[in-house]
Image: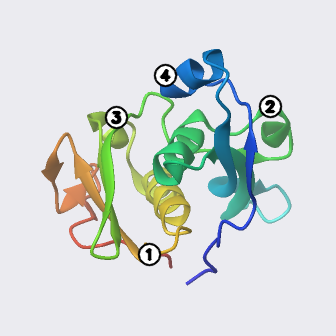
Amino acid sequence: KGKKDPGASVQVIPVAQRGEDAKKAEEGKALTVREVSIFLVRFDERTEKTSMAAVRRKVNAENPLDSALAALIAGPSAGEKRRGYLTAVPATLRVLDSKIQNGNAVIDFSGDIEWGATGSVLLSRIDQIVYTATQFEGVGGVIIRINGRRKNFIGSDGLAIGGPLHRK
């Protein structure tokens, strides 16, 4: 298992984002922000292999799991793309619900989690989600739900997702 992010870098700065964050910004309220990692796929042109790579994002500290997942779905920045960072997570994916329960992040995704879900793309997608979610204190594994239902397998290749998923 990788190291947990202790969340030591918490600061209060005004940030304009969507939804409740935008309302708070309009009202002149500062958001509590924390720096977290999201995990992207890094393609090494020399070896032609991919690996998980952490990149930092500032997110709303009031709900860092949801905010980190939203940043993951948003994907790599233009500069990160130029440096070989990719994502297997579709930009249309939505988090319907998330909670931390019994040491696991239980995350309910829209059906888009299965879009184009085959082979190494699907493995990378699940790894990106698991690595991003398990950085938080108290989260040892991830349980994936799809449209409110727990599934044992995902994608046309039948990747097992029935139990809590952990970092490799």
Residue 13, above or below 3: above
The residue carrying pointer 1 sits among few (fewer than 14), some (14 to 19) or many (20 or more) residues within 10 Å by Cα, namely some
In depth, the one of 43 and 90 nearer the eye is: 90
- Mark 2 Cα within 10 Å, few/some/many (few <14, many 20+)? few
36 or 126, nearer to the observer: 36
How far apart are the two marked residues, 1 and 2, measured between alpha carbons? Answer: 32 Å
Query: How many angstroms separate mark 2 from mark 3 (CA)?
Result: 23 Å
Earlier-in-chain disc, 3 versus 4: 4
For the residues bearing labels 4 and 2, Cβ distance under 8 angstroms: no
Q: Nearer the viewer, residue 127 or 135?
A: 135
- Helix, strand or loop at label 4? It is loop
Marks 1 and 3: in contact by CB < 8 Å? no
The residue that appears at 63% across and 57% down in the rendered structure is 39
The residue wearing badge 2 is 78
Query: Gap in Å between the C-alphas at discs 3 and 1?
Result: 27 Å
* Amino acid on which disc 4 is placed: Gly
Is the residue 142 above or below the residue 57 in the image? Answer: below
Query: Which residue carries the number 3 mark?
Result: 112
Residue at 27%, 36% in the rendered image = 111
Kindly indicate whether the residue at mark 2 contacts the one at mark 1 (C-beta within 8 angstroms).
no
Front of the two marks 3 and 4: 4
- Residue 122 lies, in percent from the top left, at 43, 53
Give the camera-side residue of 115 and 46. 115
Q: Which residue is mark 4?
A: 19
User: Circle 1 is placed at which residue position?
Assistant: 138
Indicate the amino acid at tag 3.
Asp
Q: Secondary structure at mark 1?
A: loop
